[in-house]
Image (tube, coloured by chain):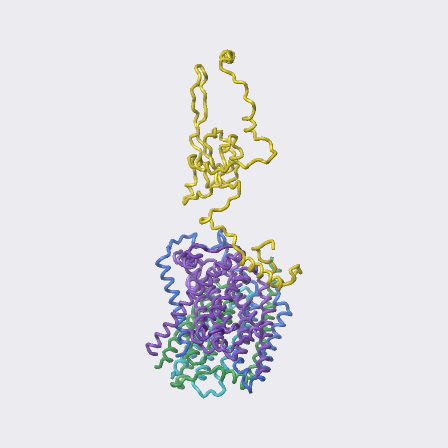
Chain colours: A blue, B cyan, C green, D purple, E yellow
Amino acid sequence: MSPYVVVAAVVVVGLLLFVAAMGARLLLAPSAPTRAKLTTYESGVDPVGQDWAQTQIRYFVYAFLYVIFAVDAVYLFPWALVLRSADLGAASLVEIAVFIGVLLVGLVHAARRGLLRWL
Amino acid sequence: MIHLAGPYLLASVLAGLGAYGVLARRNAVLVLIGVELILNAATLLLVSVGASGGDRWAAGNVLTLFVITIAAAEVCVALAVVLAVYRLRGDIDLDRTRS
Amino acid sequence: MTGLDVAFAAVGLVAAASGLLAVTTRHVVHAALWLVVCLGSVAGCYLVLGAEFVALVQVLVYVGAVVVLVLFALMLTRAPIGPHAQIATSRLHRVLAAVLGAGVTAMLAAVLLPLAAPVSRRETDTTELASQLFGTWVWPFELLSLLLLVALVAALAVSRVAGRGAREAGRSAP
Amino acid sequence: MTALEALEVVLRSVAVLAAFLVLPLLVGQTEHKVMAHMQGRLGPMYAGGFHGWAQLVADGVKFVQKEDITPAAADKGVFRFAPAVALIPYLVAMAVIPLSPDVVAADAPASAVLVLAVTAVGILGTLMAGWASANKYSLLGAMRAAAQLLSYELPLVLSVASVCLAAGSLSLSGIAAAWSPWWLLWQLPGAVVFLVAAVAELQRPPFDMPVADSEIVFGAYTEYTGLRFAFFLLSEYAGIVVMSLLFAVLYLGGWQGPFSDQLGWVWTMLKGFVIAVVVIWLRVSWPRLREDQLQRLAWLVLVPLALAQLALTGVWVVASA
Amino acid sequence: MTEPTTPSTTPSTTPEPTKRSSGGAIPGILKGLATTARTLAKPSHTAEYPDVSPHLPPRSRGVIALLEENCTSCMLCARECPDWCIYIDSHKETIPATTPGGRDRQRNVLDRFAIDFSLCMYCGICIEVCPFDALHWSPEFEYSELDIRDLLHEKDRLGQWMPTVPPPPALDEHSAEPAEIAATNKPARPVRTPAARPTRVTPQPEAEA
């Protein structure tokens, strides 16, 4: 039996936990909504405008960096399995070094152009 | 034992849905979502071929990894462009961008 | 029908249904969230097909990174709560797109389904995958790093230009 | 699948659920007490009698009875489902962490990657909560959380990859089996990177900008009340449990210790508990970082450090092979 | 160590580290950890209030007690109160003359003296201004109510707190005698009997004139 059957069962159990807890809440918790209660919370004053606000683009730079590096890091895991094999060990070390070295150029580039600095 | 009709059918459905998404959406990010669906149809085919045996170089799985990598790079660049367009124009409506 | 077939049918149905919702919903962010469900269940399909590592990479990269990036982009480009009429094209356009999409599905199914046969599932061992990746496929693999580097530099450059453009636009505006 | 196998699956998943509901409470109570004494206080003393041991149970009972409010402007479906998305990834992670070679719910062959993948999904819960609340603070908090979790996922992945290299295995049980005390020194930079990244991943002080109460109320969870709010809290503490146990398995050898044949799971729990106390200790001791300091730390300190550790591990393994 | 509970304020990575005496990021980080660890090892400062009664400093301002006998209903306290939380009702009462032919006296009788502790801000001005020492600070503080309206306390309740008022602190060693004691210690004036005041009635016609 595959261990992933248990993983799938755990996901189902998690969903069941959520549903059961919400059922318990439905039975136990009061419900008396008023208009004031349902307004958006803005520290006690009436909400101003919409929820959306222009956010700094800088967050996005980190997201790019992460996506690129995450797909790169993914290749490290298969590498771990062949590093000890006699015919591929040293060769794969060089291959990965080149692979990550090329990507590091990107990180250094971002750092040198000041994209990782805010102030 | 697994019958490959399931994976093949799912791959064609995903590709069709992706094509619809690409054609029927005006928001650039939503078009990207359609593209992702098409790419997933392709990787699903690769994996199911890999699962069927006779895959000497593990091509099904390795190529799937490569496609996922390329997709990530593609999404990065595409979203950067989308964001740039948004910054300059204030929306990402493809109809207006084209004109 | 074996157990694997049943399992595949279950995850596959979820994937198809969520894919359909992802391309038809009028809530922009919901589309991205349905895409998460779709990609996650495609990862489940990979698991059923015996490609464990690819399935995990699908979750890690696609669900964990790409979709977060998409959500990020949506939130940065004004993703209102509630249905959003402006994301869809005209009705005629949509009907045409649906016909085309159905055509793609029909064509692919017509080509692929005759090839389908029950096979004994071969689980891809991650070690085998790794030795092929670092042996046979090493040159495409190295090229990928260049591709990623180019993509990263391009993305950074584009967003930098955009940032400067917006700043200038903000300065010129009263 | 026979009925016996089905029963086994049910038992295993229920056991995971039980651990998921008990261990975070233990960590939470430890935090109450350790934090209080580190600040010269006593912490809760009443609920349950002896030193307030039932405080968190009482809190849970209270949370169930609180009114559940969905703001009128919110996206109702996403808002209501977000807590489950935040919670379930940690439940899955807990299922694959081995306490000893035998005590593990699902011994997946690539469990180290699986844990990383599911924790990456956890970001979605916060993003969903923040966006669906239709609140400025929530959206800002969600943005901060996503940026922070993205940035720190990478050092986490890299340091785990280094351990996988050292062990030559992707399974957590394989890694713990390959562990030797020499790793304490050899993998130390990676361990430090993992601990810092894990604390950041959990949005715990000093990395709690996404919920910085003095700046953005409570970040993505501002609009949440009652049981849904409690679920977010539970997922935070479940996250501490997962990350601590993971640290124990990856860097401290898990069940390795005297009498590991019989007491292996005790060792893992004990090591994990020590790490959890360290995580609490960090919270009490240090002030919050600024958002830009956080990102600089990730990209200019942790990532290079993790890559250096990776290089060291790779070269060492090849040289000693 | 002067501040046992305050963690070190050196952030782990200051972008431009302003070189302080703590000497860089890592020592600062460790110092923060050491501080909290030391506090952990020490006994805590928490007073377990309902189980252990708190040690109140002298001159604690708990509640305002009323010594009803001293009150003359002069209304000074009510008028000085910044938030008008003192309510006083009184009426005049005539005391018949004690001596034959004597004049009837009048005095104020206190009907109601109430302090609304939901309004009171414990400034103590009423106590300061009372010329007859009718109001006192009592250290009693356990008088919370479930309903805010129940915090309006009438004179009998205010009087019940009087026994909890501590005696005034002892005077400094060489200080001057308090006025009351000086007054009592003064040699008594020669006692004048009513007989010694024969002209007692005579001014009356003058006054009427």
Residue in the foreground of this view, choosing between C56 and A32: C56
Q: Is residue A35 visible in this depiction of the protein?
A: yes
Image position, residue C97 (x, y; %): 44, 74
Which of the two residues, E56 or D300, is positioned nearer the viewer here? E56
Q: In this rendering, would D222 be left or right of E22?
A: left
Q: Quadrant of residue A119?
A: bottom right
Q: Is residue B94 above or below residue A85?
A: above
Of the 4 image quadrants, the one containing the C terminus of chain C is bottom right
Is C12 displayed left or right of E172 in the figure? Answer: left
Residue at position x 52%, y 52% in the image: E45
- Residue C101 shows up from this direction: no
What residue sits 43% from the left and 41% below the top? E151
Quarter of the figure that contains the N terminus of chain C: bottom left
Residue C60 x %, y %: 49, 73
Q: Compared with residue A67, is residue C143 higher up or lower down, i.e. above or below?
A: below
- Image location of residue D197, percent across then percent down: 54, 68
